[in-house]
Image (cartoon, rainbow, N blue to C red):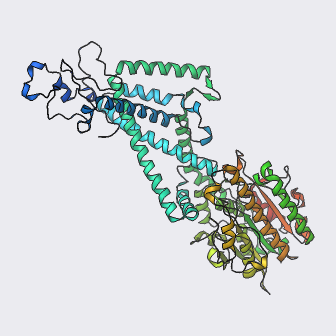
Amino acid sequence: MSLFTRSRQLSDTTEGRAEPDDDTGTSEPEGGTGTSDPQDDTDTADPQAGAATDSPESAAPAQRTPSGQSPTAKPGWFGWRRRYPRTARGVSVGTTVLAGALVLFALLVPNRIERIEFASFVRIPAEGVLLAGLLLALPSKPRRVTAVVTGVFLGLVTVLKFVDMGFYQILARPFDLVLDWILIENGTDFLRETFGRTGQVLAVTGVIVLFVALLVLTTLAVVRLTNLMVRHRPVAGRTVLILGTAWITCMTLGVQIGTVPVATKGNAEFLGNRVEQVRAGLADARVFEKQASVDAFAKTPPDQLLTGLRGKDVLFTFIESYGRVAIDDPAMARQTDAVLKEGTGRLKAAGFESRSGWLQSPVTGAGSWLAHSTFLSGLWIKNQQRYRSLTTSDRMTLTNYFGKTGAWRTVGVVPGVRRAWPEGKYFGLDHIYDSEHLGYQGPYFSWTPVPDQFSMEAFERLEHGKKDREPIMAEIILASSHNPWSPIAHMIDWEDLGDGSVFHRIKKEGTDPTEVWKDPEKVRAEYRKAIEYSIRSLTEWVERYGDDDTVLVFLGDHQPVPTVTAGDTGKDVPVTIVAHDKKVLDRVADWGWTDGLKPAGDAPRWGMDTFRDRFMTAYGPRG
């Protein structure tokens, strides 16, 4: 018998009547007839209880035990309730209280962790009041069906709220019911890569068990409370009326506990927003198709494309999670500023100048591939549906246009890719170096397969350092600053990199992610160190291997997770152009960017999708 199933108990009474077993004591229907509502099968007296109401004279002594009950009767839990009536009653009352608490929790819990507070759970939910009134008004069979359906639906809504909590913690936005299912697979991959196969299996199993348990428990809880209301219909009816009046009053007067309104219709608003989100998601494909059909450079002859960069090696480099928070946050600003000033000075001493500004990424927390494709395609790739549409279209990207000129060899260095990446062909790269083709024999650093310094050295060895080569356009993705930032590598002498085996020792000296993530301040500190490592890897490479023809564009792909941003909801990322040839930077003088590797707070801020066309215009024949 389920914990939430109504149970009955028989008691010894001299009159032979059955003692009510309801949590609050069963009250006789109005009118004093002792009969139940004919519509309510839940109101029908238990047969065993009915037998107990017969007069003592009607029962033969041989059929009675000393307690006055049939020796074959074992009411509730194999007779346990009869042997321990007080304990059984306590369990019954406790179960009903837990059922009520679960339903109230499901109705009132917000979908964001930072909104969970005591005041959130002492509100009056309009949906709960209306549902109680509906269940009291329905006939028996429709009521049972409605209670079960409501319980399942309430469980599903609660699950969706929990999923939203996770998405807000990582992506600073709610789960998209149309477009985000692919991210669940990515999430399980991240668990495997961070905590191993065992950790992944345990986490996924735990989530499935909790999902099923929540659906079952909310359903049983709603059914139990429905039965309780029906058995106490007059009291339940008056309670619903009082709560409804209180809700209207509190809503009209704007009564609050702190900043939390007492009267809430949060679930209705929550579901309304999700319906609108689904409609927008379904319509987004048509909107995106129209946007993708417009390309200002589609008809430009190849010999007129990117003429201001001919003969140069052009590197577009993404630093994972390098967001504005690393520069502006007081807890990180001093250290990051020192690294950027040091890099600016060392590059200047080597003959390089730099300019920096801000770009607004379409994502935050995660979804790097969406930011990369936004930057390269000139389209706002804000979800997986747009990404799939883009990578199956003929839309030209920045890398495609470099290849179209025939003046550059185009390569990709993507150490974060560890399996087949069919989308790579879309970006028109002549060759792609993933984690298996960089010659790295060292350990993974949590999610990161190859430390950034080694990735840059491998690019030098495999492409840039070759003699008698043609100019290179490279897309390079530096992944050491990828979540969870523990353990992280640190800079070593470039001559000591070898095949990467040296990083085994460095990893052992690093921090443990399970310990780091217990303290948000430790997470923020490790994030900062990872960003510093990525910046040093890149600037030292330019200082060491750059020449008169080197042009470097590097940027962050998105802000880090909310644990690091600490409430900052902005999506700005730094972007910098570094060049030895002064003419290269002269072409973007009207952009108003800041000198050096650190953009000023008031430097221009553009959408990431606008960079492609601005860049191609600046370095075209009319730039």
Most distant residue in the front direction: 66
Most distant residue in the bottom direction: 468
**In the image shown, does 161 or 408 lie closer to the viewer?**
161
Identify the residue at image location x=68%, y=56%.
380
Judged left or right of residue 121, residue 425 is right
- In the displayed structure, 532 sits above or below 215; it is below
Identify the residue at image location x=85%, y=49%.
602
Judged left or right of residue 469, residue 79 is left
- The location of residue 411, given as percent across then percent down, is 70, 76
**Quarter holding residue 74:** top left
- The location of residue 145, given as percent across then percent down, is 33, 36
Q: Quadrant of the N terminus?
A: top left
Judged left or right of residue 598, residue 317 is left
**In the image shown, does 595 or 233 lie closer to the viewer?**
233
**In the image shown, does 409 or 190 lie closer to the viewer?**
190
- The location of residue 264, given as percent across then percent down, is 55, 29
**Quarter holding residue 298:** bottom right
Count of labels in the image: 0
- In the displayed structure, 104 sits above or below 379; it is above
Query: Does the rendering let one see residue 472?
Result: yes
Q: Quadrant of the C terminus?
A: bottom right
Identify the residue at image location x=85%, y=69%.
621
- In the displayed structure, 8 sits above or below 466; it is above
